[in-house]
Amino acid sequence: MSGLKSGSVVFEHVRKTFGSFTAIHDLSLTIEPGTLVTLLGPSGCGKTTTLRMLAGLEHPTAGRIFIGGKDVTMLPANERDVSMVFQSYALFPHMTVLENVAYGLESSGLKKAEAREKAEEGLSLVGLAGFGSRLPAELSGGQQQRVAVARALVLEPQVLLLDEPLSNLDARLRRRVRTEIRDLQQRLGFTAVYVTHDQEEALAVSDRIVVMHEGRIAQEGPPRALYETPASSFIADFMGEANVVPCEVVGIEGNEAVVRLGSLEHRVPGRAAQPGPAKLAIRPNAIRLAPADGAGLQGLVRHAAYLGDHVEYEVETEVGTLYVVDPDVDRSLAATTPVAIGLHNRGVAIITA
Amino acid sequence: MEQRNRRVDMTLGLGLAGFVLLPWYRIEEGFYAFRWLARFPFGADEAPGLVQMVAEGRWWLAVVAALLLAAAAVRFFSPAGEARGRLLTALGVAGMGFLVLQGFAITFAGWSWTIGEALFGPLSIGQPAMGAGAVVVGLSFLFLFSVGLAEQGVMRGDFFVIAAIALLVALVAVFVFYPVLSMFVGAVQDIDGSFEPSGFLRNIQDPAIWSLDCVVGGARCGVAWRTLWLAVMTATGSTILGLAFALVATRTRFPFKKGLRLLTVLPIITPPFVIGLALILLFGRAGVVTTFLSDLFGIEPGRWLYGLTGIWIAQMLSFTPISFLVLIGVVEGVSPSMEEASQTLRADRARTFWRVSLPLMKPGLANAFLIGFIESMADFGNPLVLGGSHGVLSTEIFFAVVGAQTDPSRAAVLAIILLFFTLSAFLAQRLWLTGKNFATVTGKGDSGIHPALPRALAVGVNALVIPWTIFTLVVYGMILVGGFVNTWGLDNSLTLAHYARAFSVSLQDGSIAWTGVAWDSFWTTMMIALIAAPLTAAVGLLTAYLIVRQRFVGRNMFEFALMMSFAIPGTVIGISYIMAFNMPPLEMTGTALILVACFVFRNMPVGVRGGVAAMSQIDGSLDEASLTLRASSWRTIRRVVLPLLRPAIVAALVYSFVRAITSISAVVFLVSAKYNMATAYIVGLVENGEYGVAIAYSSMLIVVMLVIIAGFQLAVGERRLRRETRIAAPAGVRPLPAESIKEKIA
Ligand SMILES: Nc1ncnc2c1ncn2[C@@H]1O[C@H](COP(=O)(O)OP(=O)(O)O)[C@@H](O)[C@H]1O
Ligand SMILES: [Mg+2]
């Protein structure tokens, strides 16, 4: 199970249409060997379609796809060196766990005994040694998920594809399994393409994140860059919530831009900013509420909701209604309380697009 | 790369074998007798394509050779890829096109159209129907076409899927659409094949078909109107009775519900004319009831049974169970929570039923009505036995072919009218009812219980159901007892003579001699049914797989055409088969092959429906998982799809086997002295007035089929019904799929 031959993935101007509907518009993307890249985006944005084209379950309408440097555009699924973990796991209900894991090995022409041996190895890799003779229906959801991973991994593919692998697990299990998958990937060093619509999951497991929106790549980069310097209001809002408000860049000082937000001035890191009107993405927890003092940006609390470890406010201001998360649960502000608005340094970014 | 070349090589090898190693033309005494081997390859009749071309003067076969050579050249001089794919596809299309064209253009006597002679001059020699060689070469062109498409990346480059689709389309074209088309052409042809519309024009205006005399007080309406009237009456009656049965079985505390459901098996195992036969034994001029009434009350024995009334009763008996089966699903499909909601809104049980439950069932009732309508239209057995000279369309067609004055054009016209009626009903069912299904059970937490029926209604349905059940039991009792009675009405003593005459066996010189008159047709029937059943199941399930799992251009058309072929009445199929397969390019009348083909393509839609229903319950990602695990489509089908489909496979096998035994309408046209089928033989017995033997033989068939069905049920294990979850284990054996019985067309 060691020494997986991790391969790179390249999409070159790939387009996919279903009838008159274009699911993917001109997608170009390079994935380095040995990395875990997440396709992230709201439901229906084309993540699964992208993944299925990589697996060979759909063929692109135009463009080329390379795996490990080889053009696989026209190759059927069973002749590609990738394997896939399905959202529903797709374990064959009439085969035992061991038969499931050995299935791909036998399909690739391994002798039965050899295939079984490797399948056992694969099962112990995911901590399920000894479960081989059970039927999938006799396993818990988390165990089924691990069988699906083992079944895909024993083929030692160049690229492992995972389509929302955690969506059928409950919240607690999700956290644990995603750590397991990431550990396994780092230990064995294979290339993985991971699809999810959950930004927290994406932040937690990825080397790089590709955010998709309506069949296009909206932004691509390491998790931290995406979170801290979103390129568009869509990204800002999708990668954790954000208040997107109009602002004016009034000056550039070194690596910082000075922006004016109503009657408030604030310094924001932002190399690419140009003087003039722009937009500011403000994380809900980057807003500081203080007793109204007449100076700076003023607001009026409209709603307040106590949520245990924080309080959520809706505050009406001259730049629009802001959504604020305040960790100070002791100081609960009632509706109609006037407040003054301040900003933290972290969690505020200029949006150029 | 390797594999792609291997596919082309195998396809070319197949083509070569067909051209060089097999007789090109049809062997008169049968290919499987293998007597042609003695005179192969230089006998004029037995020679392969190559010899026919070189030595027998059939120069046009050179085109076939040239196309095969061109394909070989492409294979060796062009690398696998899209360009080669396009060439191979084109060659495949050209080859198939040429084979069809030459088959029609050149027949026994040479050119069949003058344009051929004008272009190429007269031929010194014609050609008989295609044989094994031509068919195999045709197949190889079809595969060439598929290989080409696969190399162009069509259907994700999946050769197996492309070839399967192409093959199915070709088969359906040859065995469903070509015959029906031939029938249309035959309507405007003379017996010698020349264009002659006068017969068509005379028949289509015939008052015997269209007269509306009976409305204005005349004697009798035309056969078209009578058939339509009968169909409407049967559909209405069987829908009402079926609904009553369904309500009793699901909404009352009737003590014999299980027994009631057994009734739904009856139409599958009953040869279609048997009910009519039993009615004759009861109500015919010498029937039990008739003689009883005349002895007791001096009621004059009448002939009222022999006509529309009798046919109507027989059809009600035959089709009520089908309607019952359809409507059980409909009645159970009404969500109890709707009815409970109605009750909490202050509606009493009666109001709930009439205002909520019944309106929700309406589309289902319409469906049952249309099924009853189509069944009645297509029914051939009962009218044949009971109609006498007052027939309906299906029997008139038959008599136009076998009757005193053979009139193929009249048969074709009648068949076209019948087809028009049934197809209209079918289209109504598809277009009007699709999407109007209010069945509201979602499978998700839809608990609650159906309210009991309002009292008045409960009394009413029981008053219908109980007498009708008793009547049905008496009729079936007649069938079982009938075979043991000497001569009904005249001599009611018990005897084994009928069974002995039909099924006697004796030992002669230490070997068994099948001396009974029935054995011959019985064994033929078993053999044909045994050959047809697995083919039907295979073709049906393969089609279902393609329809459910593959997206291809024209898929909806494909499915629609297949299902439509099921609305073609058997009589129409029969007449169109003899019109299509009686002369080159394809000649099959009088063979076992034509019977097998007829059964496969008549019963396949049931396999398709069962397969589609079963396959829709299997998560599609299972197949995809298998593909990404390096398995080919074929391996995926074998290892993943088939094992999960086992119940559907068994159902399709049993159904097609049983249907091959019981059907009569198409068969009666296609049997021959050598290959006679049980049902056709029994009809012959009835025509000779040998009711005793006929009914004995029929009961024997029913018993055989019951044993077979029971055997299958046992072999496959207990029936386990539970709601499928997304990746649920296969649910054991289902009963025969409801659709299969709904669609039974005699
Ligand atoms: N087979 C198909 N036929 C038609 N439309 C499809 C098909 N598969 C996906 N789509 C459409 O393509 C879009 C992208 O789908 P998908 O890739 O599944 O989205 P997601 O990002 O949620 O995985 C959706 O609008 C979907 O409706
Ligand atoms: Mg998806």
Image: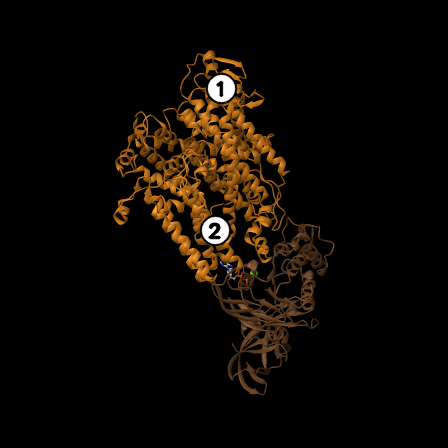
- Crowding around mark 1 (Cα neighbors within 10 Å: few <14, some 14 to 19, many 20+) is many
Residues at circles 1 and 2 in contact by the CB criterion of under 8 Å: no
Label 2 crowd bin: few (<14), some (14–19), many (20+), radius 10 Å: some
Chain under disc 2: B
Image height of B492 relative to A264, above or below: above
Can residue B253 be seen in this snapshot? Answer: no
Chain A colour as displayed: brown
User: Is residue B45 visible in this depiction of the protein?
Assistant: yes
- Label 1 CB-ligand 1 distance < 8 A: no
Would you say B132 lies left or right of A270 here? left
**Could you say where residue B501 lies in the image, as x and y percent from the top left?**
51, 19
Q: Please indicate whether residue B574 sits to the left or right of residue B203 in the image.
A: right
Camera-nearest residue between A109 and B343: A109
User: Which colour scheme appears in the figure?
Assistant: by chain
Q: Position of residue A274 (x, y in %)?
A: 52, 83
Q: Quadrant of residue B665?
A: top left
| Element assignment for label 1 | helix
Looking at the rendered structure, the kind of residue marked 2 is Gly
- Between the C-alphas of marks 1 and 2, the distance is 57 Å
Please state the horizontal and vertical placement of residue A138, each as a whole percent of the image. 69, 50
Q: Name the residue under label 2.
A: B13
Q: In which quarter of the image is the C terminus of chain B?
A: top left
User: As shown in the figure, which amino acid type bears the numbered disc 1?
Assistant: Gly
Circle on res. B202? none
Residue placed furthest toward the right: A130
Q: In this view, does A168 lie above or below B285?
A: below
Asked which secondary structure carries label 2, the reply is: helix
The residue where tag 1 is placed is B692
- Colour representing chain B: orange
Marks 1 and 2: which is nearer the front? 2
